[in-house]
Amino acid sequence: MSGKRKRVVLTIKDKLDIIKKLEDGGSSKQLAVIYGIGETTVRDIRKNKEKIITYASSSDSTSLLAKRKSMKPSMYEELDRAMLEWFNQQRARGNPISGPICAKRAEFFFYALGMDGDFNPSAGWLTRFKQRHSIREINIRNERLNGDETAVEDFCNSFRDFIEQENLHPEQIYNADETGLFWKCLPSRTSVVKGKCTIPGHKSVEERVTIMCCANATGLHKLKLCVVGKAKKPRSFKSTDTLNLPVSYFSQKGAWMDLSIFRQWFDKIFVPQVREYLRSKGLQEKAVLLLDNSPTHPNENVLRSDDGQIFAKYLPPNVASLIQPLDQGVIAAMKRNYRAGLLQNNLEEGNDLKSFWKKLTLLDALYEISMAWNLIKPVSISRAWKQILPHVEEKEGLDFDDEDISVSTVATILQHTKGLENVTTENIEKWLEIDSTEPGYEVLTDSEIIRRAQGQTDESSENEEEEIELIPEKHINHAAALQWTESLLDYLEQQGDMILPDRLVIRKLRATIRNKQKMTNSSQ
């Protein structure tokens, strides 16, 4: 007779490991044996997957997750949700968070939420709040978080020691950073309105997406941009497969990065592409992703490959704004490239500004922003790491040619743009910098934090989704595509000024379509 199975209490980290193994195809039966638990327990973990991941993602300490065995709720759950949302936003901004500040804010939310009874935000309550959410003590004390040169030096020294211990090459060290982009924004002759393009006689609109850049410290591996838009499939995509876009596209009702999207990006895009790149370079498939403290970045324990060789590490809140590599002019240069490219396209197509603005689609913008990212040279990215890894410049022997789009360059293009010939230098600068402080995450007001804590949804976001109505997909068969290609080739042959490479590209495309048609016919 077999003995009774010893009761095993899993830690949060154990549960996260089981979730990863389940996602990779592991069976409940196998995992039950490995962890010494019942299959029912494994199924319960699968059922509560999102709850566990959300809890772990919002926790601040990996070591505490490895010890913590329960997600014990607070007797004031709404207050806990509001406080955690507020805390994460304050930390992301680098604001100082002391015990008294937390207590005062907790008292405010308690009464603003309309909760019953008396509430005393004592030191004991604060301790329990930190324990429930695995928040490190260092982030609660009254420390200076406003950008401290001493803290920068301390972090850089410790990070260099870390990469030496881990034996990491600059090729294996990455940074990712989000920003908001007003993609349908053109300069005005008078003033630039944030997120809007003001054109005489035309209604103003606001269009915004979140863009995330990611590259390694040498600048030689730039991942495709990650873009978060509002609609799952905007009308301009039509029958385009999102997998064939020049960016990695995700959707979220407010076009914000969130914990779920970031985790998907890390697991499905970052880890596989980094492995492939390092393999091509003959390097060990091991890498670190350096991140700031955005509320949309999950805990380090969540951002880790199955073998633990590709993982995330966080910049301290008090130094992120000073030394985060991609925030040292790289993202700003990409946005300038994008906006100058829009104007140049308008000029080359000979459109009037109103027509160009009206025809500009999100799909157009994605191709243009991808091009703008490709224009960023490795040297610019390596230079942005100089405070953290000063030896990269010396080792790579970099050439520091200035590639940034200047105001004068844009002014020259505008002189030939009908309707914008007289835009002032000041307005050009404002236009180029219009979304420079736009975060990639949603910044909530106190009222919005309260509504979210109470489980209320934003009705306006649902209406915005309805506005982005999908156009029914039109199926184009091989024969029709081949006919259009033949017509385009005839047109190019008749144009004396068309260069040979253009014709060769279309001929190659024609050959591809012919092969697909043959394969389809042979399979029927």
Image (cartoon, rainbow, N blue to C red):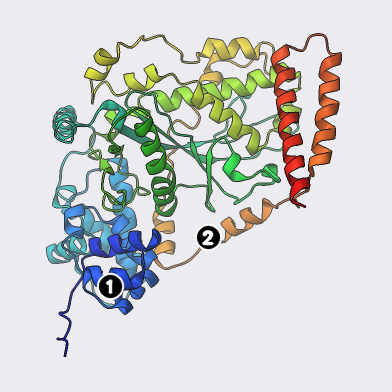
Name the residue type under label 1. Answer: Ala
Give the x, y percent position of residue 221: 40, 28
Foreground residue among 509 and 248 = 509
User: Is residue 484 something that shows in the picture?
Assistant: yes
Image height of 106 relative to 500, above or below: below
Relative to 435, is 297 on the left or the right?
left
Q: Residue at x 71, y 45 (%)?
A: 238
User: Which residue shows up at 81% across the image and 34% down it?
Assistant: 482
Q: Which mark is residue 237?
A: none
* Residue 52, placed above or below residue 412: below
Q: Which residue is mark 1?
A: 32
Left of 101 or right of it: where is 84? Answer: right
Find residue 209 and report its horizontal and vertical position in percent: 53, 41
Question: Please, what secondary structure does the residue beneath circle 2 have?
Answer: loop
Q: How far separated are the C-alphas under marks 2 and 1?
A: 41 Å
Dot 2 amino acid type: Asp
Q: Can I make out residue 419 in this image?
A: no
Q: Nearer the viewer, residue 466 or 259?
A: 259
Residue on which the image places disc 2: 458
